[in-house]
Amino acid sequence: MSGAVRLDKLLANMGYGSRREIQALARLGAVTLDGKPLSKADERIKLSPDLPERMLVDGRPLDPLPGVALMMHKPVGVTCSHKEAGELVYGLLPSRWRMRDPALSTVGRLDKETSGLLLLTDDGDLLHRIISPKRHVAKRYVATLARPLRGDERAIFAAGDLMLEGEEKPLAPAALEPLSDTVARLTITEGRYHQVRRMFAAVGNHVEGLHRDRIGGLDLPADLEPGRYRIMGEADLAAIFA
């Protein structure tokens, strides 16, 4: 990360308030860099990876700079949307993060009744790299089924010729790993609407519970509790494409 930007523009775009409010914070000495107050809101700040460690706003470390990526353990009952009614994934983040510009967006979606690994970022290039069909980034789900597996699902899903109802293009091959009679892991490389649920419906079953535990080579951390999130590092991002 490089370049420089006015203090008031930087903090306003990160959701700390309007430019006028940032100017007031600066006059009060509430913004410091390397322990020294920044009293002029028009001062240009050099952007660097360590800036959140060096700058304090109201005594607290600066939020992550633009270009941030998060991993979240999405709970059941929360929607991946900015506008729908009910509890939203963005409500699990600090309130000012919802005012950031560029805005944080989910990388793909999990439906309301699906839990597990969800990525969010304000980096458009990263988002498109992950969801691009050309990348074939795999997504792994654990499905709890209403009825026992028949035994032929693995071959059907792997064949690459399964047609979902209402569609004209067959699904790409997918890998099924039975864990018990009624629980299975399914790895897909596409992201069609309610794809996993519709796949099991196509073989006469019904998904009662669905959980995503991996995107690419990135696993949902065992210690990341439902509703919690953490900032992703370079190793996490690399794992997606490994």
Image: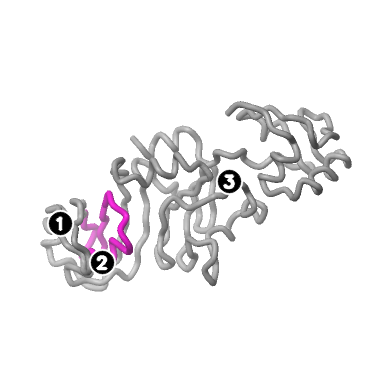
Amino acid at dot 1: Arg
> Picture quarter containing residue 92?
bottom right
- Badge number at residue 102: 3
Q: Secondary structure at mark 2?
A: helix
Gap in Å between the C-alphas at discs 3 and 2? Answer: 34 Å
Classify 181 as above or below 138: below
List the residue tagged with mark 1.
154
Gap in Å between the C-alphas at discs 1 and 3? Answer: 42 Å
Contact, CB < 8 Å: mark 1 with mark 3?
A: no
> Picture quarter containing residue 42?
top right
Residue range of the region highlighted in magenta in the rendering: 177-200
List the residue tagged with mark 2.
198
The location of residue 159, given as percent across then percent down, is 12, 53
Q: On the picture, is 56 further left or further right than 121?
A: right
Amino acid at dot 3: Pro
Mark 3 or mark 2: which comes first in sequence? 3
